[in-house]
């Protein structure tokens, strides 16, 4: 039995842990959850109509979204964790027609998009009563994931499979062919290691003499507690700007999120973020007092992003006993579970046919 350490218990790390073959591996996950992106996230799984031109990223995001039905089945995810309620994409009238064409075109290679419809303002309002009159493209394949609930489900599942979970900040070293994980209390040895530490990857690799093309990006979103009890069945609305509306169950409505490239690892909620999101979202809402009348809390997390905004997941250069995965940016809930699954395939079956999804690892990690 080989010993594997997974550093980082976000969406990649815990998905990987739960897909590992426990006949082959004894698994320990180390996670310091402060600032974790997965638990702060908005939850949108709907990559198909993105304006991004990076073909490898699109292939990964498309396959990541297509992986969700398997994920839901494998981990028996209830609707409170993941639900496919469709996505409304709001645009100005003339842009809607080209968006509709794009959706039909993308559907050729991504049938997961589901049914594509152009909805009138009244039809949009019937689907999501919070919105004011505005037409939209509606795709039925869009889903939403509650990141924190997903991790709670996977932690429970991991514990029931005798995977060890440790809440600790760690650093690593390599001595001959063994990996050492150093925590406050002890040093433990492992045969293999998976570094799924989001923006914390740079610090983990520094002592190995490696530099990483990873930067932290601050993201803030607002969680409103409203009285709309049927909100869980409402679709996500991607608004014509930088803000989205993500309705979860029991009246919880998320609005967000900010993308603050100069925010570093700061986790302070700011009134500027509130104002920014209010300005971006307010014009789309029926109730002009929405932002003032409901109790609100902030969620703040740190995304990891690379110079070309593309994720990477691979073995360290010339080192098949260590994999790294980071740089998932704003779409990591969409790509993260699939990346965790692919990494597990590598450890379980020694398969790593991943190059259609990314540039070579030395573009992101080097001496
Ligand atoms: C506000 C916000 C909204 C978002 N909305 C969406 C969305 O709608 N759709 C979507 O697809 N994506 C969204 N994302 C992006 C998505 O959440 C991330 O890309 C994804 O969760 C990253 O997963 P990860 O496992 O790579 O990293 P993380 O979830 O950040 O997990 C990494 C973990 O490793 C831990 N760690 C780091 N270093 C160490 C160390 N030395 N020792 C121990 N632990 C360590 C970290 O603390 C963290 O807990 C959003 C992100 C944010 C912040």
Image (cartoon, rainbow, N blue to C red):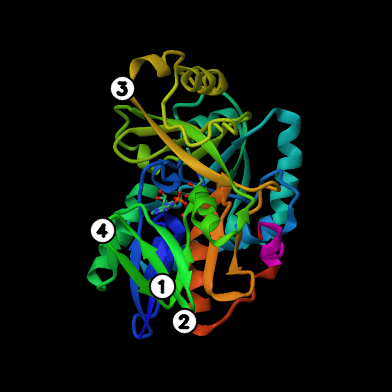
Vertical order, 167 against 176 (above or below): above
Question: What residue do we see at 26% from left, 73% from top?
Answer: 161
Tag of residue 152? none
Element type at marker 4? loop
Chain-order first, disc 2 or disc 4: 4
Real-space Cα distance between discs 3 and 4? 41 Å
What residue is shown with label 1?
A: 19
Residue 116 appears left or right of 85: right
Range of magenta residues: 356-365
Dot 2: few (<14), some (14–19), or many (≥20) neighbours within 10 Å? some
Real-space Cα distance between discs 1 and 4? 28 Å
Residue 1 appears left or right of 363: left
Total number of numbered discs in the rendering = 4
Give residue 307's position: percent from left, percent from top: 69, 46
Q: Nearer the viewer, mark 1 or mark 2?
A: 2
Q: Nearer the viewer, mark 3 or mark 2?
A: 2
Chain-order first, disc 3 or disc 1: 1
Residue nearest the viewer, comparing 77 with 335: 335
Tag of residue 185? 4
Vertical order, 313 against 303 (above or below): below
Quadrant showing the N terminus: bottom left
């Amino acid at each position: 039995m080989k010993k594997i350490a997974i550093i980082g218990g976000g969406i990649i790390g815990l998905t990987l842990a739960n897909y590992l073959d426990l006949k082959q591996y004894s698994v320990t996950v180390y996670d310091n959850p402060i600032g974790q992106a997965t638990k702060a996230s908005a939850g949108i799984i709907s990559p198909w109509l993105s304006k991004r031109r990076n073909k490898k990223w699109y292939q990964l995001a498309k396959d990541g979204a297509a992986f969700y039905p398997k994920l839901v089945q494998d981990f028996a995810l209830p609707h409170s964790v993941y639900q496919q309620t469709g996505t409304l994409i709001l645009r100005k009238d003339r842009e809607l027609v080209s968006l509709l064409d794009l959706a039909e075109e993308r559907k050729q290679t991504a049938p997961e998009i589901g049914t594509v419809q152009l909805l009138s303002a009244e039809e949009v309002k019937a689907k999501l009563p919070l919105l004011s009159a505005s037409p939209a493209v509606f795709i039925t394949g869009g889903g939403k994931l509650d990141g924190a609930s997903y991790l709670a489900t996977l932690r429970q599942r991991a514990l029931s499979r005798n995977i060890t979970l440790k809440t600790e900040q760690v650093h690593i070293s390599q001595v001959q062919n063994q990996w050492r994980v150093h925590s406050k209390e002890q040093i433990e040895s492992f045969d293999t290691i998976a570094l799924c530490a989001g923006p914390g990857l740079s610090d983990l690799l520094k002592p190995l003499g490696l530099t990483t093309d990873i930067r932290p990006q601050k993201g803030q979103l607002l969680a409103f507690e409203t009285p709309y009890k049927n909100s869980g069945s409402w679709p996500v609305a991607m608004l014509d700007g930088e803000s989205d509306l993500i309705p979860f169950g029991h009246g919880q409505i998320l609005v967000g999120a900010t993308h603050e490239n100069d925010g570093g690892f700061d986790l302070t909620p700011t009134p500027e973020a509130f104002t920014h999101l209010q300005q971006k979202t307010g014009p789309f809402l029926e109730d002009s007092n929405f932002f003032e009348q409901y109790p609100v809390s902030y969620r703040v997390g740190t995304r990891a992003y690379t110079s070309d905004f593309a994720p990477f997941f691979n073995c360290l250069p010339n080192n098949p006993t260590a994999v790294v995965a980071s740089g998932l940016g704003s779409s990591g809930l969409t790509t993260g579970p699939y990346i965790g699954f692919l990494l597990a395939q590598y450890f379980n079956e020694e398969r790593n046919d991943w190059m259609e999804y990314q540039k070579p690892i030395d573009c992101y990690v080097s001496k």
